[in-house]
Image (cartoon, grey):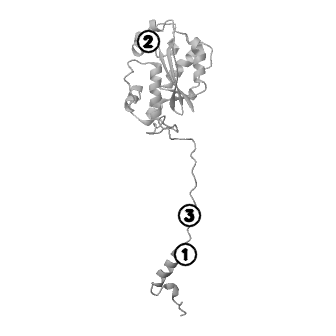
């Protein structure tokens, strides 16, 4: 089962007032585990990046100026996500911005029905507890030391680990059918040799010893005459 963990960085909070996407980060999961395949791009929004947004992401107007436009990266982005379900933290926010960008370049919107919101999962699993990405990483002991600023790809990678924990976590020591690379004594098929037939009939000596034993018994029940009364 293929899924895509998605995160965005933006110039603000609302695409309806002109805010734009300035970074997209995606992580591919297969059977809920990261495969190592990612998609990441910075984008020139064609406008300034407000100071408050730059303080969060570290992406300034000067940095994103001259980066590809969304229209230039739309095909590569859509090819990467395909028809796979999308995992996002506050999916309405990220999907809203992505769909606004897709609309501006005349592309079909992504369906929110195909998205899984990890904020909703967290609130169902831990009612009343903080559900931010930072809080969930701390809850699950996921290393946050590299997260000085928000970054779309880094946050998607962290979210892929959070998502795995929210849906049950990986069983300790589970190799999911993959053999350890250090083992050399494993083979796809082990041929077992049948054991030789073991006779169970008593030998002549055993039968004679049994008769001697029976003669030592006093009044064995099988020699008594049945009562006729």
**39 or 162: which is nearer to us?**
39
Quarter of the image that includes the N terminus: top right
Crowding around mark 1 (Cα neighbors within 10 Å: few <14, some 14 to 19, many 20+) is: few
Tell which tag, 3 or 1, sits nearer the viewer: 1
Can residue 100 be seen here? The reply is yes
- Between label 1 and label 2, give the one nearer the viewer: 1
Residue positioned 58% across, 48% down in the render: 191
Residue 198 numbered tag = 3
Check residue 112 in the rendering and tell me which mark sits there, or answer none: none
Along the viewing direction, whichever of 32 and 202 lies nearer the viewer: 202
- Marks 3 and 1, how far apart at CA: 17 Å
Pointer 2 local density, CA inside 10 Å: few below 14, some 14–19, many at least 20: many
Q: Report the residue marked by disc 1.
A: 204
Q: Vertical placement of 219 versus 18: above or below?
A: below
In space, the residues marked 3 and 2 are separated at their CA atoms by 79 Å
Q: What kind of element bears circle 3?
A: loop
Closer to the camera in the image, 5 or 117 = 5
Q: Which residue position holds label 2?
A: 59
């Amino acid at each position: 089962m293929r899924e895509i963990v998605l995160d965005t960085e933006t110039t603000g909070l609302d695409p309806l007032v002109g805010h734009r996407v300035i970074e997209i980060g995606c992580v591919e999961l297969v059977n809920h585990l990261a495969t190592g395949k990612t998609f990441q791009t910075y984008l020139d929004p064609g406008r300034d990046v407000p100071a408050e947004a730059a303080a969060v992401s570290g992406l300034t107007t000067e940095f994103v100026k001259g980066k590809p436009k969304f229209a230039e990266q739309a095909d590569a982005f859509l090819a990467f996500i395909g028809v796979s379900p999308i995992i996002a933290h506050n999916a309405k926010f990220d999907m809203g911005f992505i769909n606004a960008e897709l609309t501006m370049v005349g592309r079909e919107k992504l369906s929110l029905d195909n998205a899984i919101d990890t904020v909703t999962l967290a609130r169902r699993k831990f009612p009343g507890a903080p559900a931010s990405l930072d809080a969930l990483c701390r809850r699950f002991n996921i290393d946050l030391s590299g997260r000085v600023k928000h970054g779309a790809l880094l946050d998607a990678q962290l979210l892929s680990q959070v998502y795995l924990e929210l849906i049950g976590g990986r069983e300790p020591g589970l190799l999911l059918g993959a053999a350890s690379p250090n083992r050399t004594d494993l083979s796809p098929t082990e041929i077992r040799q049948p054991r030789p037939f073991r006779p169970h009939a008593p030998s002549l000596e055993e039968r004679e010893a049994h008769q001697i034993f029976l003669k030592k018994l006093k009044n064995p029940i099988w020699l008594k005459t049945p009562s006729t009364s």
